[in-house]
Amino acid sequence: MAAMMKATVFLEPGRIELTDKPIPDVGPNDALLRITTTTICGTDIHILKGEYPVAKGLTIGHEPVGIIEKLGSAVNGYQEGQRVIAGAICPNFNSYAAQDGAPSQDGSYLISSGRCGCHGYKATAGWRFGNIIDGAQAEYILVPDAEGNLAPVPDGLTDEQVLMCPDIMSTGFKGAENANINIGDTVVVFAQGPIGLCATAGARLLGATTIITVDGNEQRLGVSKSMGADITLNFKNCDVVDEVMKITGGRGADSAIEALGTQQTFESALRVLKPGGTLSSLGVYSSDLTIPLSAFAAGLGDHRINTALCPGGKERMRRLMNVVASGRADFGALVTHHYKLDDIVAAYDQFSHQRDGVLKVAIKPA
């Protein structure tokens, strides 16, 4: 095995580069994966733009599908040569947050904001790949706490079929789970990018019977039909809030899922809710949010706002791959383009500018 590998690193806002880095050493609780397929996430675009800060020189990417190259001495239940995935969230399950039921926040730590001088906790520390440790857009990735985070890929499933599991499916499904969906509910999903499409599929699996999807891209609205949408609304052609109220006979939706991360979609998601409804927020916001007085009923509307980072760990990954194997939704269909790792900069350019109907790109080192 060569001592060096190719890896995609963040250099500065607006600039990533494919470079050579040492292949990581394997500790007793780690596993070294040889990446066979990975992808680019919308969060990676936030990193590229400098909207989400990471260290200069960090290997980015957090959606690994691969083969175990080397196992740490303390890792049991796996074998070298085995096909596996690992969740974008790879907690060690030892922190207070993890044991308190929030493993995605595992290892969160106190920070001081350079902008305002105030203090707060950096959330998302359970998200380690491409955030606080080297990530998946490389030839190899080191998976920490591997026994709790590796999930074997069932025979018969392709890389492309399980590529959504580490993040996009887990995030979208968590958005649906956080929406408190009951059988027969009406749910509005704002934005039909990959995460919103998975939220649509999750709402259907949880029993929603009227799923309304919102986007400005007709191609994506068409895909949302195949993922479970009953009604599609193009926000360029109608007032979405008015339309939802007409569809629900003035009652409002039971739940709304916000999957973009803008003030406008967040506010619209609040305005379509019934009294006592739930807003499930998935978007990554790059500026402060304002809660409108009327949309929030001055704080008296019994609304719930839930935020989420996708759960990780091998059990979450196992369940998601069970959904894939069931055939109840074709998540492989979200992979619309393929690139070699050598062409990662071109892949970022296409994905960030949303050209040629791109939803997700599959990136293969070889």
Image (spheres, rainbow, N blue to C red):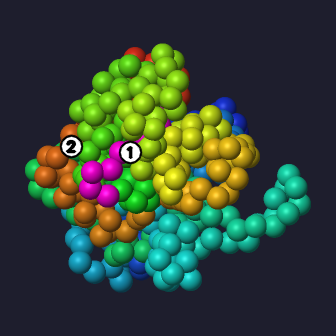
- Disc 2 designates what residue? 329
Amino acid type, residue under disc 2 in the picture? Ala
Q: Is residue 92 left or right of residue 220?
A: right
In this rendering, is residue 272 above or below 64? Answer: above
Q: Position of residue 14 (x, y in %)?
A: 66, 32
Out of 330 and 88, give the one closest to the viewer: 330
Q: Is residue 105 a member of the stretch shown in magenta?
A: no
Q: Position of residue 157 (x, y in %)?
A: 16, 49
In this rendering, is residue 213 above or below 38? Answer: above
Name the quarter where the N terminus is drawn: bottom left
Location of residue 12 by image quarter: top right
The residue sitting at 42% across, 74% down in the picture is: 145
The residue sitting at 22% across, 71% down in the picture is: 79
Q: CA distance from mark 1 to mark 2?
A: 18 Å
Out of 161 and 134, give the one closest to the viewer: 161
Circles 1 and 2: CB atoms closer than 8 Å: no
Out of 53 and 281, give the one closest to the viewer: 281
Q: Mark 1 or mark 2: which comes first in sequence?
A: 1
Query: Which mark lies nearer to you, 1 or 2?
Result: 1
Q: Which SS class for mark 1?
A: strand
Q: Position of residue 298 (x, y in %)?
A: 70, 53
Residue 93: assigned label? none
The residue sitting at 15% across, 52% down in the picture is: 325
Q: Which residues make up the magenta segment?
A: 182-193
- Disc 1 designates what residue? 187
Crowd rating for badge 2 (residues with CA inside 10 Å; few <14, some 14–19, many 20+)? some
Amino acid type, residue under disc 1 in the picture? Val
Q: Position of residue 331 (x, y in %)?
A: 26, 41
Q: Is residue 335 left or right of residue 300?
A: left
